[in-house]
Amino acid sequence: MSAFYALLFTVAFLVLVIGLTKKIIQYSRVPAPLKIPVTPAPLSKGGVAVRLAKEAILFAALFRSNKWTWLFGWMFHMSLFIVLLNHLRFFIKDVPLPLVLLQNVGEYAAFTMFIGLAGLLIRRLFVARVKYISAPSDYLWLILLMVIALTGIVMRFVSHTDIVAVKEFSLGLLRLNWQALPTDFPLMVHLFLVAVLMILLPFSKLLHIPGLFFAPTRNQVDNPREERHIAPWAAELDAEKNKVQPK
Amino acid sequence: MADFETPKFREYPTVPLIKQDEMAGNGPFISRAEFDTDLGYPGELPDDWKEKTLDKMGDLLGRYRSLQVFMDSCIKCGACTDKCHYFIGTNDPKNMPVARQDLMRKVYRRYFTFAGKYFPKLVGAVDLTEDVLDEWYNYYHQCSECRRCSVFCPMGIDTAEVTMAAREILANVGKAQKYSNQIIQKVYKIGNNLGLPGPALEGILEDLEEEMEDDCGVPVKFNMDKVGCDALLMTPSADFFAEPHIDGLIGYGKVLHELGITWTVSSKASEAANFGLFIGSYDNIQKVSMRIREAAIDLKVKRIIFGECGHAWRVAYSFLNTLAGPFDFLDQNYPIPQHILEVTYGALQDGKLRMNKAENDHLTMTFHDSCNVARASRMGDQPGGQFDIPRAVIQASCNNYVDMDADTIKDATFCCGGGGGLLTDDLMELRVKGALPRMEALKQVTEESGVTNIAAICAICKSQFTKTLPYYGFEMDAIMSVHQLVSEAIVMKGSEQEKELDGVDEEEAESED
Ligand code: HEM
Ligand code: HEM
Ligand code: SF4
Ligand code: SF4
């Protein structure tokens, strides 16, 4: 069993890293031939960084758009962020003080994460417009994350798992020195689904994570009158154009 | 003619319920082969249409980062679902921006992604059939490429980019739209969208000069093809004869005259509009833009000024320098290109224009932000200048001004309903229904603040409003050009208006005799 999970996680990790890297390379290679920031847009690179940070951290556009979706979505993501930070303790030998302190603050992040996900699921099921645009995979993502959160909660608050052993296992993964894993049921489910999530991420809508930062509508500087912006594939047309010059 | 019902004003602007297939149909007239071939398209469905479609789609995915990223990054959060005026006006769920994108995304997933190749049902991927193409044709011609949805999308997904790509793909398999392609062909053959030949245009401009002389007693010039002027004026051809567009043109004429800027239009490039944008064709956008470069060179001007037109200003502001630049042969002290509102606003700031606002006292104005100006361009040197400058110019020309509801203006503005190549009679039902949210906001200010008229800075908006206002119980001439207000209020030196205003001058002048 431990060997299966060790293998699974090694594969999952590779798929995640290679898959995501390939996508990021693809996104950066495809040219953005014309300036299309949605205006008003920042006039400098610094301004663009602020704009993107506001979207990534506060979900600013979503906030303008729909307060309920924002509430549940933001709650889910922020909780997820805290949960993931907390999980670093499984991968770092000597946990630094800030992370230890976060343990207390982050105690209940699992619950807010679950509530956020539940809110999004309810919206998806009961708002006709959102239901209309949902494919089976859209529900499954929410359910998958809810089960991950739920099994986590069970491990933490109901039937504890041997987290020292889990830490040995995950540190072992990093060091390519596979260790035994406790085999209680919640942990098996938790880890299996986490591996599924990692494997599917580069092939799914979870590509919104890099996608957000690559959207030309948000990441371009508003300076088209000052600077030209020629895509490599348009260079030939451009050269042709340059023949038209004042005599 | 109208075999549809004008939507009722909603008591509360709640989100509409969905009505499946409300706008199913064949879409606007398909282009004729002759228009297509001039633009470089096949003009009929080829036998290998399926491969051609997928090839073109792959090609565009490799050329446009926007398309590639947007196909992947939609999270199906639904935030955009109630943001499109065509959805609000028609209730057809395929007019929800995400559903519109999904028409293409479903095919993208089927042929270009692992998940869709092996688990199509799971991720909602579909096979490409001719029915799918017909559905694309119909619904990608129910999007005015206004970008309102992208403002509200947490991922910044711009449906307009998807629509443009879809139209480009469709054109490559013989399913181009007649209206847009015919117009582009006219631009190439005659010089403008309306097919107005040079001599006719010259006649119109001469009449305008005479009219000006009679009205104001000042020789305001409307030149055509005059070499050596300061500026080339690029303005939508509707400005040459349609109402209220032409009143705007008169306004530009007066402002430029007053500032001593000599200007000319070009018969070869007598059109600011660039429908290449609407059909999503880089080649055509560029080809249409190149006319401007050529005209500027031929006429030896120092600057290029654009008249009131929304998408033309987008292409000018955002793309012209890239597509037809560098303009190192023009005077670098002015923005290249410059919007007429930037000229007027600058002059007002510097106190170079005398305005008699009382001329417009019978009006209470509001302003319709045109989508392409609001969300795809800028004016002035600060972000948001595209909102402030037109408002400042209106308020310098008129005492009474009220904004519409904050959710319907500036970057949240609702499209007039006729943008993006949809301003054609065969789409009248869509145009009227799509105007609903704008009409509701207008209705509100007419009732609450006594607004009498609405000003716009886009030829398409103006034409669309002229047609759709009556459907909603407004007068068709409630729509005005911003420079029409300027034209009414401006007091040119030596004009009849000046004499009237300063009374004394006239007498003095007489006594001196
Ligand atoms: C930079 C990091 C991220 C940003 C900025 C981000 C942003 C967003 C936004 C704005 C939404 C739409 C609103 C909502 O439904 O919450 C969303 C949805 C979603 N995100 Fe993220 N996200 C990030 C990372 C992640 C990660 C790491 C995961 C999962 C492991 C994830 C899973 C999801 C899911 C499943 C949804 C869909 C929710 C639904 O079905 O309604 N996100 N994300
Ligand atoms: C290799 C990766 C992971 C391992 C080894 C792991 C392991 C564990 C363990 C042992 C617990 C119980 C903690 C305790 O008893 O104190 C737990 C809790 C939890 N896990 Fe994971 N987990 C992993 C990844 C994830 C991921 C990716 C998510 C979210 C998508 C997640 C969400 C949770 C939640 C919400 C809890 C409960 C609250 C908490 O302890 O923060 N886990 N996990
Ligand atoms: S770009 Fe405008 S018309 Fe097109 S889907 Fe978005 S909101 Fe609707
Ligand atoms: S708002 Fe953006 S991410 Fe959300 S469903 Fe619409 S297009 Fe997709």
Image (cartoon, coloured by chain):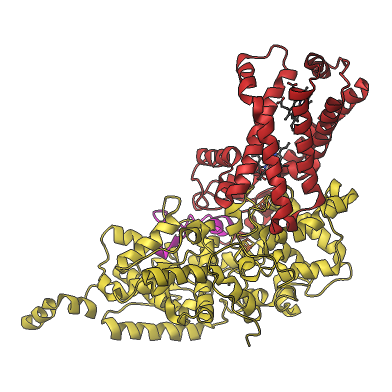
Chain colours: A red, B yellow
Q: Nearer the viewer, residue A171 or B182?
A: A171
Classify A135 as above or below B190: above
Q: Image quarter for residue B506?
A: bottom left
A98 lies left or right of B300: right
The x and y percentages for residue B50 are 86, 64
Q: Nearer the viewer, residue A175 or B213?
A: A175
For residue B208: magenta? no
Residue located at (80% from left, 55% from top): B108
Q: Image quarter for residue B230?
A: bottom left
The x and y percentages for residue B513 are 8, 83
**Stretch in magenta:** B317-341
Name the quadrant of the N terminus of chain A.
top right
The x and y percentages for residue B438 are 52, 68
Residue B422 visible at all: yes
Q: Nearer the viewer, residue A45 or B106?
A: B106
Residue occupying the far front of the picture: A158
For residue B337: magenta? yes
Residue B75 visible at all: no
Circle count: 0
The x and y percentages for residue B420 are 61, 68
Classify B445 as above or below A90: below
Classify A73 as above or below A101: below
Residue occupying the far bottom of the picture: B1
Residue occupying the far top of the picture: A94
Residue located at (53% from left, 39% from top): A50
Residue located at (76% from left, 64% from top): B169
A200 lies left or right of B225: right
Residue located at (78% from left, 17% from top): A163
Q: Nearer the viewer, residue B450 or B218?
A: B450
Q: Image quarter for residue A87?
A: top right
